[in-house]
Image (tube, rainbow, N blue to C red):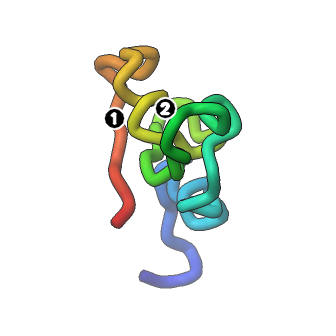
Amino acid sequence: MGVDATYPHWVLSLIETEFYEPCENHRDSEKVKYCNFFCMDCTKSPLCDLCYSHNVHKGQPVVQVN
């Protein structure tokens, strides 16, 4: 793509996000959860599988980074 290409609003956030960091919300769980989900609507911090499964992002486009 050229310099003038336009990208969806979430692409730059996805590229700048650091994945596989311990989840701030689930640090005290029995097993440390690492964040490898990204919500394309919220574009804030990445999510772990527990955060994602709480349906906060239900109906929103979410990608899993492997």
Q: Which residue is mark 2?
A: 41
- Residue nearer the viewer, 5 or 65: 65
59 relative to 6, above or below: above
Query: Dividing the image into 4 quarters, which one contains the C terminus?
Result: bottom left
Mark 1 or 2 closer to N-term?
Answer: 2
In depth, the one of 30 and 55 nearer the eye is: 30
Q: Position of residue 20 (x, y in %)?
A: 54, 61
Please say if the residues under marks 1 and 2 sit with CB atoms less than 8 Å apart.
yes
Query: How dense is the environment of label 1, judged by Cα within 10 Å: few (below 14), some, or many (20 and up)?
Result: few
In the rendered image, the residue lying farthest to the front is: 30
Give coordinates of residue 42: x percent, y percent.
56, 31
Mark 1 to mark 2 CA distance (whole Å): 7 Å
Residue 10 higher or lower than 25, as above or below: below
Residue 54 percent location from the top left of the image: 40, 17
Count of numbered circles in the view: 2
| 14 left or right, relative to 54 | right
**Which quadrant of the rendered structure holds the N terminus?**
bottom left
User: Does dot 1 land on a helix, a strand or a loop?
Assistant: loop
Can you say whether 16 is above or below 31 in the image? below
Residue farthest right in this picture: 24
Q: Which mark is residue 61?
A: 1
The residue that appears at 51% across and 62% down in the rendered structure is 6
Q: Hey, what amino acid is under mark 1?
A: Pro
Residue 23, by quadrant, is: top right
Residue sitting at x 49%, y 59%: 7
Q: Can you say whether 48 is above or below 22 in the image?
A: above
Q: Is residue 35 left or right of residue 21?
A: left
The picture quadrant where one finds residue 53 is top left
The x, y position of residue 41, in whole percent, is 49, 32
Residue at image position (63%, 51%) is 22
